[in-house]
Image (tube, coloured by chain):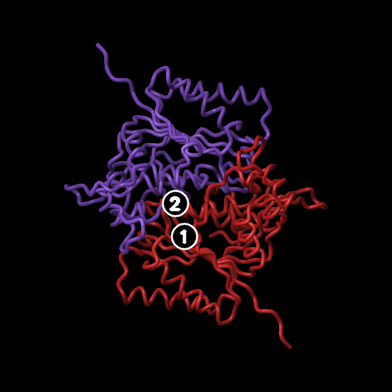
Chain colours: A purple, B red
Amino acid sequence: MSHPRATVHWIYAHPQESSFNARLFRDGVEALSRDYDVETTDLYRQRFDPVLAGPDLGDPQGRDGNVVELMGEVYAGGQVPPDVVEEQRKLHAADLVVIQFPLWWYGPPAILKGWFDRVLTNGFAYGPVDPDTGLPLRYGDGPLAGRRALVIVTAGEDERSIGRRGVSGDLDSLLFPLTHGTLWYTGIEPLDLHVVHDADSLGRTEIDHESARLRERLSGIADESPSSPYRRLRDGDYHGIRALRTDLLPGRTDLGIHRVRSD
Amino acid sequence: MSHPRATVHWIYAHPQESSFNARLFRDGVEALSRDYDVETTDLYRQRFDPVLAGPDLGDPQGRDGNVVELMGEVYAGGQVPPDVVEEQRKLHAADLVVIQFPLWWYGPPAILKGWFDRVLTNGFAYGPVDPDTGLPLRYGDGPLAGRRALVIVTAGEDERSIGRRGVSGDLDSLLFPLTHGTLWYTGIEPLDLHVVHDADSLGRTEIDHESARLRERLSGIADESPSSPYRRLRDGDYHGIRALRTDLLPGRTDLGIHRVRSD
């Protein structure tokens, strides 16, 4: 008996074809292609336009009204720009989403930030309300639920300066707007980050090692789940849709409180 | 006796001229212009290109090598693209930097993220090392030290869902990559955030009120300092350039530990 292979959408942002990131992208896609149908978004090569502007709001000349509402109308009316339609198609078809980028100013490069701004539109990635509870379907639920995401990030700093209590902040907190505020918001469950530290100073042997380490991780990705999942809004851990219940982890204010197992 | 007026650089990102953000931008610039020389960067109107690419690395066709090193060579060699040169000129001339944007996916719109990616280049915004200590001049020091920044952000959510223990994370943590990882990294001291909550549902009276509240704050901005400044790397609170000293705020891992007065 045959069944369709699982599908991966790998979204990648780096300007140089000769870069370490390009190597990881090529090797990772090749490795996954043995077991999955892999579709890619090579943002630089596609010359993806990351600027959310008039066409995304229903009129190239610009249009008055609330941005979120306008994007909802555009999606409902089938007027989404063709380049965004294509990205939405690939993302919607995916069981696993891979997002790979170098850390620039402690976040994703603009070309990737704009992919989220433009592709994750109202109606496609968020918007519906649970008819039973009246609560919005977000943070764990929502239109893209059922998918998992692997975020691969290369950082110039070492594990200590960008780790817990590190001078630059810890990477889990720095990327919380992406893993929790973007992916989890729409229903996509982020796996543990895949981080390469000291990425600006790797020698040839270390690059080979990092490629092997990534391929090793990808080989087991089908069975992987996050070591500490984010809380689901519908599980009742929050006061309505607002703050974490006062009896849960009292006094703590770090972003780790939004994980089910917060150590 | 006359002396030159202080200078403001106001960087603004919103696609619609009819938006609430546009109103705050116009009213704020007008108010400041009475006491300051104000230069503006209206990213959408300028059609600023936020994608760091070949020209920023010294060759429109792309060039091999480490991105940080290449950008340092480009800056040292006077090959910075003209649109970036102009932004660097305005920023360097400023005593106060205002950065205004709507919160999209819990961060700045791509057109603004790319302004940081392209304008804050190696050599211009970071890079030098303290000859006495051998430590890099960053986090409080660095080429842009002596400037202050006011970050103005409009958010669709209310104070609780995006506040302390809020389901979306607190705004101070969500914007840490900007206020600490970007501004403070280069030496620019961020003032307390200026936040407008529920920004998608303001009525006419509330919009007038928010304009007045912003102008009121701007009227006292010359004397303002952050209620809890970030720690300076050179003050010895960290193990070298890495993690916060274990005797300071032991056990805490929230991003607030990087402030001098952490409550």
Q: Amino acid at mark 1?
A: Tyr
Are the residues flagged by discs 1 and 2 in contact, CB closer than 8 Å?
yes
Residue B223 visible: no
Task: Check the picture and name the quadrant holding the N terminus of chain A.
Answer: top left
The extreme top residue here reads A1
Crowd tier of the residue under label 2, counting other residues whose Cα lies within 10 Å: few below 14, some 14–19, many 20 or above: many
In the picture of the structure, the residue carrying the numbered disc 1 is B44
The secondary element bearing badge 2 is classed as loop
The extreme right residue here reads B132
In the picture of the structure, the residue carrying the numbered disc 2 is A51
* Quarter where residue A102 is shown: top right
User: Are the numbered discs 1 and 2 placed on the same chain, yes or no?
Assistant: no
Q: Amino acid at mark 2?
A: Val
* Quarter where residue B260 is shown: bottom right
Q: Residue at x 63, y 56 (%)?
A: B82
Counting labels gives 2
Residue A7 visible: yes
Q: Is residue A101 above or below residue B121?
A: above
